[in-house]
């Protein structure tokens, strides 16, 4: 049985990954691909599903904040093959630590934002209830007075 490998154009890969054609060329220039990108008729890039799968890993690592040099180093290690698993693990553990720290900071930010949303929702509810059904509602402008404990903006 012949080995049938799907051949994808740069436009198709851009569509599948959400990366621009420019970003795909940039990643290739930066040595981020594990395998060299094949060239078809007329020198056009021809990608395989393995290339797309690798790009998916790269996209996730970049989205999580992995610096390009670290991503390039990781690709180099994968390209070299077996025998450097400890270095790959160390690189990923270091990144894992950075992402974990970032998640902790973002959780603190989200907690504060959630608290502030609750403060403003409570304030608006109080103003609506104070207006009563027959009285006009006051405009809800401005910020919470700084003199109210725990509600300053």
Image (spheres, rainbow, N blue to C red):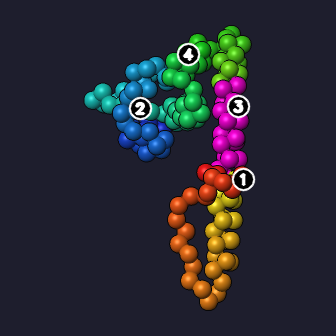
Main secondary structure found in the magenta portion: helix
Mark earlier in primary sequence (4, 2): 2
The residues bearing labels 2 and 1 have C-alpha atoms spaced at a distance of 53 Å
Mark earlier in primary sequence (1, 4): 4
Task: From the image, tell me which residue sits under label 4.
Answer: 73
Q: Which mark is residue 100?
A: 3
Mark earlier in primary sequence (2, 1): 2
Span colored in magenta? 97-114
Q: Residue 78 is drawn in which quadrant?
A: top right
The residues bearing labels 4 and 3 have C-alpha atoms spaced at a distance of 21 Å
Residue 26 in percent (x, y) is at 39, 26
Above or below, 111 relative to 80? below
Q: Residue 134 is drawn in which quadrant?
A: bottom right
Answer whether residue 85 is visible to the viewer in this image: no
The residues bearing labels 4 and 2 have C-alpha atoms spaced at a distance of 18 Å
Residues at discs 4 and 2 in contact (Cβ within 8 Å): no
Callout 3 environment at 10 Å: few (<14), some (14 to 19), or many (20+)? few
Task: From the image, tell me which residue sits under label 2.
Answer: 24
Q: Secondary structure at mark 3?
A: helix
The N terminus is located in which quarter? top right
Instruction: Give the residue drawn at x 44%, y 33%.
Output: 47
Residues at discs 4 and 3 in contact (Cβ within 8 Å): no
The residues bearing labels 1 and 4 have C-alpha atoms spaced at a distance of 51 Å
Mark 4 or 3: the one toward you: 3
Q: Secondary structure at mark 1?
A: loop
Foreground residue among 35 and 6: 35
Task: From the image, tell me which residue sits under label 1.
Answer: 149
Residue 66 in percent (x, y) is at 57, 26
In the orientation shown, which residue stands out farthest toward the front?
147
Instruction: Give the residue drawn at x 53%, y 72%.
Output: 139
Callout 2 environment at 10 Å: few (<14), some (14 to 19), or many (20+)? some
Residues at discs 3 and 2 in contact (Cβ within 8 Å): no
């Amino acid at each position: 049985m012949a080995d049938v490998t799907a051949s994808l154009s740069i436009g198709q890969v851009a569509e599948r990954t959400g990366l621009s054609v420019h970003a795909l060329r940039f990643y290739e220039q930066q040595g981020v691909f594990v395998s060299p990108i094949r060239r078809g008729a007329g020198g056009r890039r021809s990608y395989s599903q393995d290339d797309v799968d690798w790009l998916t890993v790269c996209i996730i690592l970049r989205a999580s904040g992995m610096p390009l040099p670290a991503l390039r180093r990781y690709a180099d290690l994968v390209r070299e093959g077996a025998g450097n698993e400890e270095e790959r693990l160390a690189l990923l553990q270091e990144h894992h630590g950075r992402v974990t720290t970032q998640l902790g900071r973002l959780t603190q930010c989200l907690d504060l934002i959630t608290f502030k949303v609750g403060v403003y929702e409570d304030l608006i509810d109080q103003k609506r209830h104070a207006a009563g059904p027959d009285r006009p509602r006051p405009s809800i402008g401005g910020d919470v007075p700084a003199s109210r404990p725990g509600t300053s903006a």
